[in-house]
């Protein structure tokens, strides 16, 4: 069985797949008479295909049994999909170039202060959390026909022990 290593999530390592949403290195702007700070342009939301609309939703997720078996991947052909945690707990991100090529899989450990925005057509695993009841703000394209799933020929294991 092929094991996929998990490495820390960085903007550079994730760039081929989309955006890492984090404020590290960003320059905040003071707003609201100095009582708040704003950081702009954290991700490029893509919903323009076929007159798309932006959908903002809340996901509540449960942890999968360990070791985490990877059986399917998905992608969104009509727009990007952003996940941002609402608690400060690490979570996992799994992407690949081709779901039929096991060497193309990349696993990442995101901090509870990092989100991701999967670019249009990027293969990724559905939400992977390490604890039950973890909540995420999700921004993606509203409507139908924006999901393609592929079941894998060979079950893979996400190697969380080494991360």
Image (tube, rainbow, N blue to C red):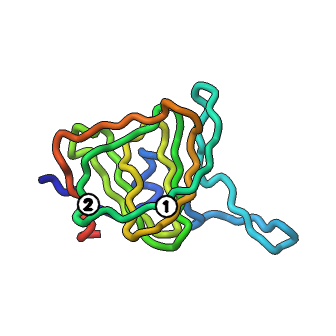
Image position of 16 with respect to 69: above or below: above
Q: Tag count in the figure?
A: 2
Q: Residue at x 24, y 70 (%)?
A: 161
Instruction: Report the residue that reaches farthest toward the top.
Output: 50
Horizontal and vertical percent position of residue 92: 38, 61
Crowding at mark 2 (Cα within 10 Å: few <14, some 14-19, many 20+): some
Horizontal and vertical percent position of residue 28: 70, 65
Horizontal and vertical percent position of residue 124: 37, 46
Give the residue pinned by disc 1.
60
Front-lying residue, 105 or 51: 51
Give the residue pinned by disc 2.
68
Image position of 61 with respect to 118: above or below: below
Crowding at mark 1 (Cα within 10 Å: few <14, some 14-19, many 20+): some
Q: Is residue 112 shown left or right of residue 103?
A: right
Q: Is residue 43 shown left or right of residue 73?
A: right
Q: Is residue 94 shown left or right of residue 100?
A: right
Residue 26 visible in the picture: yes
Residue 20 visible in the picture: no
Image position of 36 with respect to 15: above or below: below
Q: Residue at x 46, y 32 (%)?
A: 77
Q: Which mark is residue 129?
A: none
Front-lying residue, 31 or 157: 157
Front-lying residue, 158 or 66: 66
Rounded to the nearest angstrom, the CA distance separating label 1 from label 2 is 18 Å
Q: Residue at x 44, y 36 (%)?
A: 147
Q: Under tag 1, what secondary structure?
A: strand
Horizontal and vertical percent position of residue 11: 47, 57
Q: Under tag 2, what secondary structure?
A: strand
Q: Residue at x 87, y 71 (%)?
A: 33
């Amino acid at each position: 069985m092929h094991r996929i290593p998990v490495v820390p999530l960085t903007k550079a390592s994730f760039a081929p797949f989309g955006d890492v949403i984090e404020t590290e290195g960003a320059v905040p702007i003071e707003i609201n008479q100095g009582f708040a700070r704003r950081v702009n342009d954290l991700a490029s939301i893509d919903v323009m295909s076929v007159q798309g609309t932006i959908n903002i939703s809340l996901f509540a997720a449960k942890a999968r049994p360990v070791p985490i078996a990877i059986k399917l991947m998905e992608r969104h052909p009509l727009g990007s999909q952003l996940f941002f945690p609402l608690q400060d707990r690490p979570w996992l991100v799994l992407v690949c170039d081709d779901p039929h090529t096991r060497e193309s899989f990349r696993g990442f450990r995101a901090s509870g202060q990092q989100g991701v925005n999967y670019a249009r057509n990027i293969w990724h695993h559905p939400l992977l959390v390490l604890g039950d009841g973890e909540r995420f703000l999700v921004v993606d394209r509203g409507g139908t026909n924006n999901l393609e799933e592929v079941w894998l020929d060979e079950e893979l294991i996400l190697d969380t022990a080494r991360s």
